[in-house]
Image (cartoon, rainbow, N blue to C red):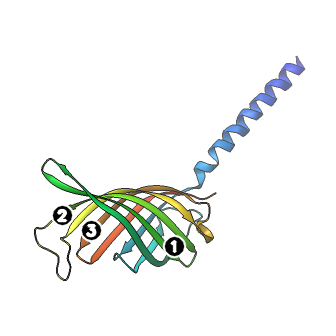
Amino acid sequence: MQARHAVLVALVAAVTLASVASAGPEALKQRVAISSKNLDSGTFVLTPLQAGALKQDSGTASIVYRGPRDVMRQGQKVSIYNSTFTFKGKRGSFTIRERSEWVEVSNENAPGGDFRPAVAIGTWKFVRGTGEYAHVSGGGRSAHAGMGREWFARQEGFLTVP
């Protein structure tokens, strides 16, 4: 009888440890926002939206994009871009990849620019990082507003720190 009791206690302990181990990484997810402006030689601010390992950071932002690939949706032209953003801050650097869908909001070019004002939404994924961003993973959604050469982006999502 004691042998059965000991086996039962060991089994309960193993299940409890497995549950705690599988719940551990979930607790390391942190909601963040990355706000950046201007297409080339821009700036960024990473802001934690909840407590966690990542702290606020700022620095330079650059973008390399492929596109557009234009599609028509219910009579509206949608321009699809695949972009790679590189952010270099005081705490390290990191790269994200994003797919965004842009629509124009005016028939006229923005003042001082060759582009028409446009807005976009998209999704992004963390690709790689250095410093405090080494081994981070995650992703989320994004929003953009482009007014000619002046451009704003905000990526929000969850990053997991090992």
Q: Is residue 36 left or right of residue 58?
A: left
Which residue lies under the disc numbered 3?
145
Q: Secondary structure at mark 1?
A: loop
Residue located 50% across and 59% down the image? 126
* Residue 42 higher or lower than 22, as above or below: below
Residue located 52% across and 77% down the image? 89
Q: Earlier in the sequence, mark 2 or mark 1?
A: 1
| Mark 2 Cα shell of 10 Å, populated few (<14), some (14-19), many (≥20) | some
Q: Quadrant of the N terminus?
A: top right
Instruction: Pinpoint residue 46: horizontal percent, then vertical percent.
Output: 47, 70
**Along the viewing direction, whichever of 96 and 27 lies nearer the viewer:** 96
Residue located 34% across and 68% down the image? 153
Q: CA distance from mark 2 to mark 1?
A: 33 Å
Q: Is residue 93 left or right of residue 112?
A: right
Q: Amino acid at mark 2?
A: Glu
Q: Nearer the viewer, mark 3 or mark 1?
A: 3
Q: Amino acid at mark 3?
A: Ala
| Mark 3 Cα shell of 10 Å, populated few (<14), some (14-19), many (≥20) | many
Q: Is residue 89 left or right of residue 85?
A: right
Q: Which mark is residue 104?
A: 2
* Residue 138 higher or lower than 108, as above or below: above
Q: Earlier in the sequence, mark 3 or mark 2?
A: 2
Q: Quadrant of the C terminus?
A: bottom right
